[in-house]
Image (cartoon, grey):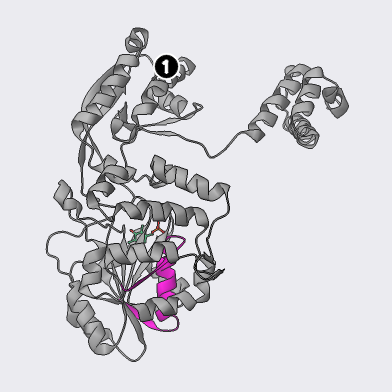
């Protein structure tokens, strides 16, 4: 045992190696030494666990291990992947994408100083929200607007402004959970509001709200059940009725719309989703929605509504904590500008463009990919183009099935789960979907310019299996 410990090389012995000397020239000495120490520590650990082999003491293998780990420490952890899941608003893969014009606008705003909080007319301090608030008002028809970090923050800000220490009335059918711990009852608690549930899961009537109102009521909350549907024997209260009740009782009506659709997508053959404009028209006092779901912009929480309410929210201390940075502002302004003209929005915003994409276009991409795959690869894999359905994602339009085309891969020779893992380990990982022992690569969410590289990487991954 003791003997084994004495066989551990000294740090200096490893540093003396020419390859490590070169590494220190290129990288920081501190990190190299730190990683050598970590490697020697794990060697000690292995001795303790009696899980050590002769070759573990080898200087050469320790040098190689050090180089590998140091280089890994310098690699980007956040990187591009190829989304071949077909899910357009994929929360795990970064939700919405920006187009070239937006990207170059953000880059310019990042490169040089901007008038972020500077009023060019007066030469005095200005508001960072000026550039987007007017646009949001024009597009939605709302009296005023406010933007925070994400929709979850928008809901918390709204509830904290009117619900703190008060009761907030919500329908039992609308107690939504969005992925990642955002649940209406918990958000409510966080904001200091007391949740008052009314009605039943499938049916809530205006009289249910009416009966629950008392002097402690702070707000009426309506939540769009964006990621699920209750079907069958159902009834819920219309926005108009809820607004009317709020008016009569002088209680603000808050609506969490979730996705934030600014154009009626049912005109493009999609499932109907309520638009922001409809809620504004119905007279809802405060409406919150996401910037990076169906709107197709950057991560943000947009709040629109009546001036008196928005004003109060602007002054809430949480507003400062939830504030957005200049990159978000530039991306949002750039995206919102397209909505002045609906056709531009469809043509220019990647999220929407991918959702309304023609099947023929998707099929073309799948074909191009197939043509680039070697015959020898096709011997190992059973690979064909199949009809498939993609999802909108981001908890939006849960019932919508978008007809698509996928490359379906199965094999008698290799294990599909191994191959799928190998695709994930590529320099630019390819993310697909396994269903019943086959791998599906849906081309809706793959870009034209990615296909060539993707085919090469695909073959590389196969060789690694
Ligand atoms: C997505 C969603 C949220 C959270 O929005 P983020 O922008 O992800 O913070 C809140 N409420 C509803 C109804 C949603 O669909």
Residue 255 location, quadrant: bottom left
Label 1 crowd bin: few (<14), some (14–19), many (20+), radius 10 Å: some
Residue 395 on image: x %, y % = 31, 52
> Does residue 186 show up?
no
Helix, strand or loop for disc 1:
helix
Which quadrant of the rendered structure holds the N terminus? top right
Identify the residue under disc 1.
459
Mark 1 CB near ligand 1 (8 Å cut): no
Q: Is residue 61 left or right of residue 262?
A: right
Residue lying at 16% horizontally and 47% vertically, measured from the top left = 268
Count every numbered label the image shows and give the total: 1
Residue 174 on image: x %, y % = 28, 67
Rendered view: 14 above or below 403: above
Magenta-tinted stretch: 143-169
**Which corner quadrant of the figure contains ligand 1?**
bottom left
Q: Is residue 212 left or right of residue 58?
A: left
Residue lying at 37% horizontally and 23% vertically, measured from the top left = 416
């Amino acid at each position: 045992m003791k003997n084994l410990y004495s066989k551990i090389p000294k740090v200096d012995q490893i540093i003396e190696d020419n390859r490590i000397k070169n590494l220190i020239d290129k990288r920081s000495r501190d990190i190299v030494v730190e990683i050598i120490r970590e490697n020697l520590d794990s060697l000690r650990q292995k001795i303790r666990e009696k899980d050590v082999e002769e070759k573990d003491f080898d200087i050469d293998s320790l040098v190689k291990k050090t180089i590998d780990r140091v280089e890994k420490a310098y690699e980007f952890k956040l990187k591009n992947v190829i989304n071949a899941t077909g899910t357009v608003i994929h929360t795990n893969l970064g939700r919405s994408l920006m187009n070239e014009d937006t990207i170059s606008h953000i880059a310019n705003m990042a490169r040089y100083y901007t008038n972020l909080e500077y009023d060019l007319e007066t030469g005095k301090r200005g508001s960072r929200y000026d550039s987007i608030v007017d646009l949001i008002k024009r597009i939605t028809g709302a009296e005023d607007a406010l933007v925070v970090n994400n929709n979850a923050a928008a809901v918390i800000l709204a509830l904290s402004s009117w619900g703190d220490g008060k009761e907030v009335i919500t329908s039992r059918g609308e107690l939504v959970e969005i992925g990642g711990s955002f649940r209406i009852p918990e958000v409510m608690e966080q904001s200091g509001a007391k949740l008052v549930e009314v009605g039943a899961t499938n049916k809530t009537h205006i009289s249910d709200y009416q009966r629950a109102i008392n002097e402690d009521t702070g707000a009426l909350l309506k939540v769009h059940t964006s990621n699920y549907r209750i079907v069958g024997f159902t009834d819920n209260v219309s926005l108009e009725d809820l607004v009317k009740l709020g008016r009569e009782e002088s209680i603000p009506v808050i609506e969490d719309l979730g996705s934030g659709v600014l154009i009626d997508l049912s005109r493009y053959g999609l499932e109907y989703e309520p638009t922001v404009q409809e809620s504004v028209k119905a007279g809802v006092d405060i409406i919150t929605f996401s910037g990076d779901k169906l709107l197709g912009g950057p991560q943000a929480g947009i709040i629109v509504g009546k001036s008196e309410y928005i004003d109060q929210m602007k002054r809430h201390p949480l507003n400062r904590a939830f504030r957005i940075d200049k990159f978000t502002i530039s991306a949002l302004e750039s995206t919102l500008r397209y909505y002045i003209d609906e056709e531009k929005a469809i043509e220019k915003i990647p999220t929407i463009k991918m959702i309304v994409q023609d099947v023929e276009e998707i099929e073309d991409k799948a074909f191009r990919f197939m043509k680039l795959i070697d015959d020898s690869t096709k011997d190992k894999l059973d690979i064909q183009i199949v009809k498939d359905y993609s999802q909108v994602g981001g908890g939006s339009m849960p019932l919508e099935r978008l007809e698509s085309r996928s490359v379906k891969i199965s094999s008698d020779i290799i294990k599909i789960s191994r191959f799928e893992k190998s695709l994930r380990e590529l320099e630019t990982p390819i993310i697909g979907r396994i269903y019943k022992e086959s791998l599906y690569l849906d081309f809706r969410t793959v870009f034209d310019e990615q296909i060539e590289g993707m085919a090469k990487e695909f073959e590389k991954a196969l060789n690694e299996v």
